[in-house]
Image (spheres, rainbow, N blue to C red):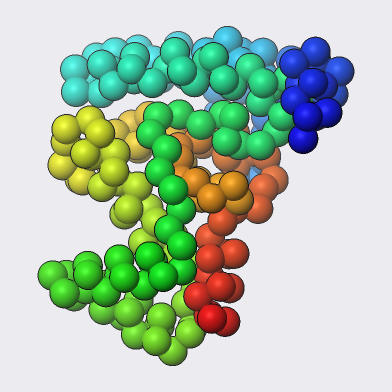
Amino acid sequence: MLDKLIDCFFGEEQDPRLKDDVIPQSGNDINKERRTIAEMKAECFSKEHRAMLESDFNVYPILLRYEAEYKARSKCFFDGETTLYEARFGEVIPLPKADEFRLLVSQWSQTDKAWQSICERIQARTLTSRDIRDVNYELYRKALAQAIGSTVKQAAHLIGRLDMAIHEGKEGKIYLVPNNLHRYIPHTGGASMLRDELNHS
């Protein structure tokens, strides 16, 4: 790990997908603005996207709150450390452990019937990755809402407006990552690991 950090700091090890002149593309129809890696490194948002966000008085102050932190740490991501955690944007919360996940869904299902089917699949040990994501995404939206003083619905709207993806990292955390990077960089998330643990424990 230390070697990776040293390489990252001095720029000696760089993923060819993250060279300055590369225009990220994939089968997921990302980066319609055709921004280069160099442009993404300099600014999280395209000029057009930023202009749209600046006109939204509910979103823009929150963008400013998180953007400086993103710029400071994402340099290491672009310079070689291709862990998406280095490209995170905004709040970070822990990925729930298996027992915490079971308790959480059980509590939610008592006030919202929408979670009862997931409760049943927990008991039957037939959870899908989609089940895991549904719970973790809602958990993140609730945490973000609390952090910015909004409703959960408003937090979900903010994530969409910022064009961010909720990512469950293999390091055991949940956070936002720019969609263009999330879809471009192959990665193994924490959802499948948690699913397997819940279905086999």
Residue at 34% in and 14% down? 64
Q: Residue 57's image quarter?
A: top left
Instruction: Residue 174: give x, y in percent of width and height.
Output: 46, 46
Residue lying furthest front in this view? 2
Residue at x 31% of width, y 70% of height: 103
Q: Decide: is 168 above or below 197.
A: above
Q: Quadrant of residue 163?
A: top left
| Image quarter of residue 148 | top left
Give the residue at the far bottom of this rendering.
124
Residue extending farthest to the left is 111
- Residue 72: give x, y in percent of width and height: 54, 14
Q: Would residue 53 be seen by someone viewing this image from the given angle?
A: no
Q: Give the camera-side residue of 147 and 164.
A: 147
Above or below, 7 relative to 173: above
Q: Is residue 70 left or right of residue 83?
A: left
Give the residue at x 59% y 64%. Answer: 193
Give coordinates of residue 128: x percent, y percent: 49, 73
Q: Quadrant of the C terminus?
A: bottom right
Q: Nearer the viewer, residue 101 or 83?
A: 101
Label count reads 0
Which one is in front, 148 or 18?
A: 148
